[in-house]
């Protein structure tokens, strides 16, 4: 009996970075894998496989919209391995209308990004990176003198801007610190946030009251530069803002200006342009911890993507609903901003 055909084109990710040998073997045991290489599939070969394909596993989406999907009458699922919730040119409405599940591997990044966010918050609160730089420059300050601007995370009020999978993981990691949690997320009902142990608040109040603010919101067409000067100036002196999702949601010039003034500390893993320009002013901010978009690229974390893909394909091919990946929701997906989720081509090329 022939196995169902699944088109696998993870470009710009390498197969070996996404699938462990065991999961790659498991995928072949349940499906007839079409292409299954690191390079982009020729369009003619992709279209030739569509009539029999029951699923597509993809990285960058380069195949057009409904006009392409109409050629795949047996298609039941499209699974992406980049971690983006939306892709330019992709037709979600066609998929919703034709009962094609659209799945994102974004949850695979939640724990690794949350761990990085917590580490950066602790490093900023305790001036760990600054202390290291001063020591290497023979300018270290011992004991109380070196702790003038530090504070404990334990017992503090923490703000979560966006309460998706990253924030949920953060909530668990923060549990031993006994923090009071404020959350702002217009996509989540207040009752849902309360059930998660958070106090739902307006954004202005969160920015004013939280000692540590984690920005984990996904880019949408409504939230570009949402954290503007008015909101950023509400942050109490000496507090920490951790920017860990996308720079899209922050007015980065204002953020840079306030951090350079010493108004508050920042820990930043994402930038408006990547790679960041050599003359980017935030590089000069002593009160900033800077990371080169590394939060979600831990090798063992990337292999979770392949595990999730095969787990959900097994379920779908057995006539069961997928459980591991994030299912696109009609009420929300049209609000996403694909451009805000993308990074520069030179950055993406390093993923290969």
Image (tube, rainbow, N blue to C red):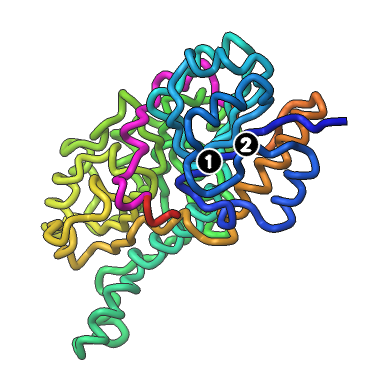
On residue 325, which mark appears? 2
Q: Earlier in the sequence, mark 1 or mark 2?
A: 1
Please state which of residues 142 and 352 is positioned toward the viewer in this rendering. 352
Residue 47: percent from left, percent from top: 54, 24
Residue 144: percent from left, percent from top: 29, 81
Residue, far top: 97
- Quarter of the image for residue 289 reads bottom left
Q: Which residue is at a point 68% across and 48% down the rendered structure image?
A: 307
Residue, far bottom: 138
**Image quarter hosting the N terminus:** top right
Q: Is residue 109 above or below residue 50?
A: below
Q: Which residue is at a point 54% across and 37% down the rendered structure image?
A: 58
On residue 106, which mark appears? 1
Q: Is residue 211 above or below residue 49?
A: below
Crowd band around label 2 with a 10 angstrom C-alpha radius: few (<14), some (14–19), many (20+): many
Q: Which residues are magenta?
A: 328-348
Q: Could you tell me how far apart the alpha carbons at marks 1 and 2 are, in whole angstroms?
A: 7 Å
Please state which of residues 78 and 163 is positioned toward the viewer in this rendering. 78
Disc 1 to disc 2: CB gap under 8 Å: yes
**Observer able to see residue 175:** no
**Magenta residue check for 336:** yes
Q: Is residue 140 above or below residue 305?
A: below
**Observer able to see residue 250:** yes
Crowd band around label 1 with a 10 angstrom C-alpha radius: few (<14), some (14–19), many (20+): some
On residue 265, which mark appears? none
């Amino acid at each position: 009996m022939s196995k169902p055909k699944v088109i696998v084109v993870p470009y710009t990710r390498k197969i070996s970075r996404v699938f462990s040998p065991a999961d790659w073997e498991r995928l072949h045991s349940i499906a007839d894998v079409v292409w299954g290489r690191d390079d982009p599939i020729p369009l003619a070969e992709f279209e030739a496989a569509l009539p029999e394909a029951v699923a597509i596993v993809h990285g960058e989406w380069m195949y057009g919209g409904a006009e392409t999907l109409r050629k795949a009458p047996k298609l039941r699922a499209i699974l992406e391995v980049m971690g983006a919730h939306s892709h330019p040119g992709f037709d979600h409405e066609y998929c919703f209308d034709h009962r094609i599940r659209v799945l994102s591997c974004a949850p695979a990044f939640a724990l690794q990004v949350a761990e990085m966010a917590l580490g950066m918050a602790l490093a900023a609160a305790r001036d760990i990176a600054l202390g290291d730089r001063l020591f290497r420059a023979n300018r270290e300050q011992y004991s109380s003198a070196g702790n003038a601007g530090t504070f404990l995370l334990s017992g503090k009020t923490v703000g979560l801007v966006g309460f998706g999978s990253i924030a949920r993981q953060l909530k668990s990691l923060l549990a031993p610190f006994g923090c009071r949690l404020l959350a702002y997320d217009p996509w989540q009902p207040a009752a849902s946030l309360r059930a998660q142990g958070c106090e739902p608040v307006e954004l202005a109040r969160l920015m004013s009251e939280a000692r540590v603010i984690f920005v984990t919101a996904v880019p949408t067409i409504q939230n570009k530069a949402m954290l503007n000067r008015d909101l950023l100036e509400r942050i109490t002196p000496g507090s920490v803002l951790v920017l860990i999702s996308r720079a899209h949601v922050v007015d980065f010039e204002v953020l840079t200006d306030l951090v350079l003034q010493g108004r508050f500390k920042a820990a930043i893993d994402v930038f408006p342009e990547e790679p960041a320009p050599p003359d980017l002013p935030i590089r000069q901010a002593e009160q900033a911890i800077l990371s080169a978009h590394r939060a979600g690229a831990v090798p063992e974390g990337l292999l979770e993507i392949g595990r999730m893909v095969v787990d959900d394909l097994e379920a779908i091919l057995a006539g069961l609903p997928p459980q591991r990946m994030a299912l696109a929701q009609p009420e929300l997906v049209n609000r996403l901003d694909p451009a805000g989720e993308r990074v520069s081509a030179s950055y993406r090329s390093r993923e290969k």
